[in-house]
Image (cartoon, grey):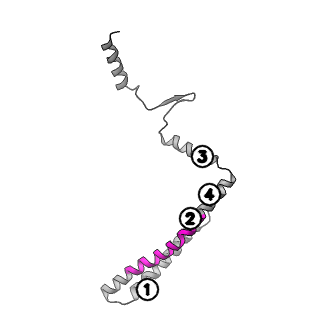
Amino acid sequence: MKPREQAGDWEKRMAGSDKKDFVEDDQGLHNPASPVEGKRAKDADKKKLNKPEKVIGDTMRQSALAMELPFTIVAAIVFPGFLGYLADKWLHTSPWLMIAAGALGFISSLIDIARRYRPR
């Protein structure tokens, strides 16, 4: 074969369907970048956790929720209350819209907390 023919053959192989992002191992062809492979890897990581690691993970999750709780309550009351205050200033209705918006914010914070902490 002449060098030019070899180059043409190489270009044909690279432009054709032979050019794929697959890896061949003892189980056959698979795509390492596919979402299914990533999901299998994540599932395998979950199976490798022993009991103390699971307890630490649960404790960290509970701590995160406990740290988030005050911000949830305060933000849900203060932000609507502030909007009610602005509406009161605009409509000259003194504290009534601020009280109503704060109460709705409080109720929404209770609903949010109940939704987050319900047993599953």
- What element does badge 2 sit on? helix
Decide which of tag 1 and tag 3 comes sooner along the chain. 3
Q: Earlier in the sequence, mark 2 or mark 4?
A: 4
Q: Give the range drawn in magenta.
A: 62-83
Q: Residue at x 39, y 85 (%)?
A: 97
Judging depth in this view, the residue of 118 and 32 nearest the camera is 32
Q: Check disc 2: other Cα within 10 Å, few if <14, some if 14-19, many if 20+.
A: few
**Residue tagged by mark 1?**
99
Quadrant for residue 91, please give it: bottom left
Amino acid, disc 1: Ile
Amino acid under label 4? Gly
The amino acid sitting under disc 3 is Asp
Q: How far apart are marks 3 and 4 (CA)?
A: 13 Å
Badge 2 vs badge 1, beta-carbon distance below 8 Å: no
User: Does the CB distance between marks 3 and 2 fall below 8 Å?
Assistant: no
Q: Distance between the residues labelled 1 and 3?
A: 50 Å
Residue indicated by mark 2: 64
Q: Mark 3 points at which residue?
A: 45
Question: Looking at the picture, which amino acid does disc 2 mark?
Answer: Ala
Residue 29 rendering spot, x and y as whole percentages: 51, 30
Helix, strand or loop at disc 1? helix
Q: How far apart are marks 1 and 4 (CA)?
A: 40 Å
- Nearest to viewer (mark 1 / mark 4): 4
Few, some or many C-alpha atoms within 10 Å of disc 3 (few <14, some 14-19, many ≥20)? few
Alpha-carbon span between mark 3 and mark 2: 22 Å
Q: Provide the residue designation for mark 4.
A: 57
